[in-house]
Image (cartoon, rainbow, N blue to C red):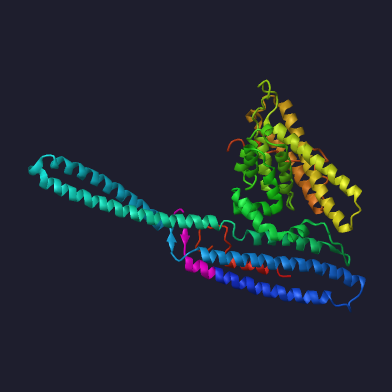
Amino acid sequence: MDENSKLYPDKVKAQCDSAIEVLRKNNEDLITANNKISGFIENDELQSQSFDKLKQQLNDYLTVIDSMISANEADIADYQNLKGSVGVEKLDGTVILKAKKDAEEGREEAEDAAKADRYLSDYYYRFGFSGAELGRIYEEEANGYEEEARICNDIINELQRKIDFYDNLEASTATLFITGHVIRHITEAAVSDIRGAFKVGNYFPNVNAGWRRELEEKESYPRIIKRLQAAGITGSQIRYMAAIDYTLREVEAALDLCKTGEDKEFFRSFLTGTSERYDKAFALSPNKISDEMHVFAAEYANHIFQYDENGEVSQAFADFNDAVWKSTKPVQDKNTGLIPDTCYRDIYMERMYALLDMGVQGLTAEKTAMELPAGECETLDTELEKRISLTNFWAAEIIFKDKLEVWYPDKFDFMRSEQSFRDLQERRDRILKETAASTVENLSLITLGILAPELAVPLSSLYLDMTEKPGSLIRLEHILEIESMTEEIKGYKI
């Protein structure tokens, strides 16, 4: 609890009831749509190749509808859980923390006064009859102050009970609404895939699309979420990984790959997508990170390697790349203890390049060996092109890094060449934006880096600017407010 913490149980319960009502109404609409679509599909009088394709597409929409109903049911259960957890007492962090501080100060003053009076009482009692009256007076005062201290202590304990209740509530509700959130995220991918598979009057479904497998396994989500929470992974971290298209099973599998304390620290540093956490990850020695975690880092980079329509790289990937560049601690030889001409970033870059290159070769072999329908082939092509692009990126970074070390042997002192770096950055950014914008327009990333690999990627911002380095439950940020959640639900109607 802090001064911004507030809990108004009546308001929370009212919001929960409103949300549950919306969700149940939404499910009624979805069930009605499900029944109508099912009736259409089961109509044997409609027989033709075109209708068969349409029915196939509608069957996929039924899968989505079923998943949306499941997401709503998961949220209903979580709202009911929240209703039963908030209790009946209003809690205000500002009031409670101030009252506790005042009570602690009062207890301390009373204890000090009691101690002083007790000392004086004992002092006068030692004089016998002549000091007995004063001894008795100070003894009574000491008893009064001790009683005051006990009252203050009772107040402190009661206030601490309220603080503990709020903190426990915040912790126990940290994973509420994650199951529904993850299912909805997958249904977004499903709807996009279904719409994109209908071309030239025909439906070409990707039967191996990841969303199909994930929606089939949605019953396991609560178990996985509880396990991740037990491992110290927060609800916001799970949501972030879902936002960059990690499935719950993939996050769980990555957690299982952690072999050492360094692996766990490395893994956790990627769960928030912040520059500070990336810096911590790549400050770890690459030689103490398992091969499995190097694979995870390479795959993670592939997840956040995104460009917008203007050719601007995602901020997460820019921060990730900067953190790699800043990882300049020299590597020590395990046997001799000597420091070779290698630093952490050399190893991280080379391993990510090698692992991604292996992935490209694997996907290429898979594509060659399989005879895929048009829809599946296009999906595989997109993934392959993205990986080729990212492989080119790391190759370009390695080339650029090696050239820097030749041009400027004192590779840790770039201050003298600031203008040179700015000029180079402008050239590289211009080429990159033109190339990326073109590839986005053509729905292809494969040309990235072909013109000149060392110029086709943005200069790490480390060297670009060297002159500057719901409702009432304010702290329960993971709880959706009813208004925004209602709009989200409406957006999923077909």
- Comparing 398 with 433, the one in front is 398
Query: From the viewer's perspective, is 215 left or right of 223?
Result: right
Query: Which quadrant, please, contains the C terminus?
Result: bottom right
Q: Is residue 137 above or below residue 469?
A: below
Q: Is residue 4 magenta?
A: yes
Q: Position of residue 175 (x, y in %)?
A: 59, 57
Query: From the viewer's perspective, is 493 left or right of 142?
Result: right
Q: Residue at x 32, y 49 (%)?
A: 105
Q: Is residue 177 above or below residue 340?
A: below
Q: Position of residue 346 (x, y in %)?
A: 71, 32
Q: Residue at x 68, y 37 (%)?
A: 324
Query: What span is in magenta?
Result: 1-15
Q: Is residue 335 above or below residue 492?
A: above
Q: Residue at x 65, y 31 (%)?
A: 328
- Comparing 250 with 309, the one in front is 250
Total numbered labels: 0
Q: Is residue 199 magenta?
A: no
The picture quadrant where one finds residue 200 is bottom right
Q: Position of residue 323 (x, y in %)?
A: 65, 38
- Comparing 490 with 93, the one in front is 93
Residue 76 visible to the viewer: yes
Q: Position of residue 150 (x, y in %)?
A: 30, 52
